[in-house]
Image: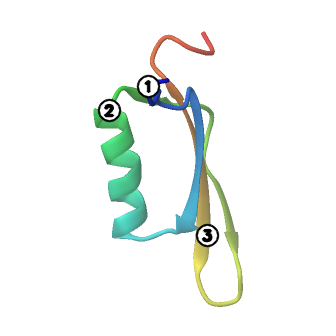
């Protein structure tokens, strides 16, 4: 069975350049943002979460 990309992804992590690159790379692969990001503060860092769906799904 060939590997198929996930139709839905929830990316979480420290809100920094590496997190933004992960999201940007997924957008380049055909994912679309699904809803607004969520952010929280853990006492040290801002933690972000962003849902993405593969283009054509969740329309």
Q: Nearer the viewer, mark 3 or mark 2?
A: 2
Q: Residues within 10 Å of mark 3 (few under 14, many from 20)?
A: some
Residue visible at 61% across and 41% down? 36
Residue that extends furthest to the bottom in the rendered view of this protein: 44
Identify the residue position indicated by label 2 in the image: 29
Q: Quadrant of residue 44?
A: bottom right
Where does the image place residue 25, in percent across and percent down from the top left?
A: 31, 45
Is 13 positioned to the left or the right of 28 in the image? right
Q: Disc 3 or 1, which lies upstream in sequence?
A: 1
Q: CA distance from mark 3 to mark 2?
A: 23 Å
Q: Nearer the viewer, mark 3 or mark 1?
A: 1
Q: CA distance from mark 3 to mark 1?
A: 33 Å
Give the colour scheme shown: rainbow
Secondary structure beneath disc 1? loop
Secondary structure beneath disc 2? loop
Where does the image place residue 56, in percent across and percent down from the top left?
A: 49, 11
Where does the image place residue 37, in percent across and percent down from the top left?
A: 60, 48
Quadrant, the C terminus: top right
Residue visible at 43% across and 62% down? 19
Identify the residue position indicated by label 1 in the image: 2
Identify the residue position indicated by label 3 in the image: 47
């Amino acid at each position: 069975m060939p590997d198929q990309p996930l139709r839905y992804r929830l990316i979480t992590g420290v809100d920094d350049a590496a997190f933004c690159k992960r999201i940007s790379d997924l957008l380049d692969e055909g994912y679309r943002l699904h809803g607004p990001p969520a952010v929280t503060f853990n006492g040290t860092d801002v933690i972000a979460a962003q849902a993405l769906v593969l283009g054509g799904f969740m329309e």
